[in-house]
Every structure is written in structure tokens, then in C-alpha cells.
Image (cartoon, rainbow, N blue to C red):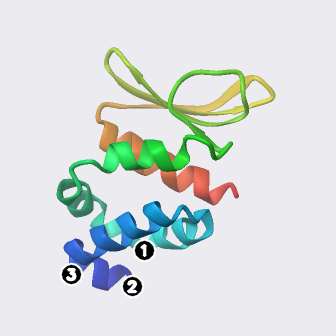
Amino acid sequence: MAELFRDDPVYAADVLCYTLAEGDEVDLALLLPQLEDAFDAVWALVPDLVGRLHEFFSGSERLYWTPDAVDGWYCVPVENGFDVYHQEHGRRERFIQFSTEKEAMAFVLKAAVARR
């Protein structure tokens, strides 16, 4: 599948959008590793991908878009980019900063799904 997605990013974008619309986190967990090589192309082809990702994960208890006191992964916009970190028992772990939202989201999506 990874090779198919890399060769046909339009199809990969369609599959990702369908998976996000269905709201199945297990399917997304299976899909994301296959999209790794095609993520840049998919990002370019789906102009509202950020909104779809925010909507899909907003209630998942695993990934959050604003700082809070709940355990899970965070991808938070800051002045010079995006902070990505995991919070466990109120303590931030694995803090990483990215300059672009695409890089931050790609990382945090893989990390959040991998911790399932």
C-alpha cells in the first residue's frame, strides 16, 4: 500500500479523507504508516487536511490542539512554530518543536497512533 500511495497521492488523499470522515481510529492507525512516504503530496492535495485532522481527533482523549491538564499528545501553535509533546500525569515529556504545522502534525499523528 505504501508504494501505491507514493505512486498515486491523489488516491492516498482520498483514502485518508474517507478514513477521517468515517471516524475509525483503528483504520487510521493502520493507514498512517502506509502514508508516510506520500504525506507531503497528500498534505498538498487536501487543502483542508488540518481542519479535518483537528475535527477527527478533537474528542479522542489522545491528541489535543491546545494546552490543557489532560494526559496525551499535544500539538500546540507557538510564536515560532509548533510545540509537540506528550503529557503524562501532568508532566510534559518528549518535547519537540517544529517550524511547520505539516511536520508537527505528521510527527504527532504517528506518535499518538503508535501509543494506542
Give the crowd class for mark 1: few <14, some 14-19, many >=20 residues within 10 Å: some
* Pointer 2 or 3: first along the chain: 2
Q: Are marks 2 and 1 in contact (CB under 8 Å)?
A: yes
Type of amino acid under label 1:
Gln
Tell me the tag on residue 1: 2
Instruction: Please identify the quarter of the rendering in which residue 37 is found.
Output: bottom left
Type of amino acid under label 3:
Asp
| Label total for image | 3
Q: Residue at x 18, y 55 (%)?
A: 44
Type of amino acid under label 2:
Met
Residue 48 in the image: state x and y as whole percent: 27, 48
Return the residue at label 1.
Answer: 34
How far apart are labels 3 and 1 at the CA level? 12 Å
Q: Nearer the viewer, residue 60 or 69?
A: 60
How far apart are labels 2 and 3 at the CA level? 10 Å
* Pointer 3 or 1: first along the chain: 3
Location of residue 42 with respect to 87 vertically, above or below: below
Compared across the picture, whether 111 is left or right of 16 comes to right
Return the residue at label 3.
Answer: 7
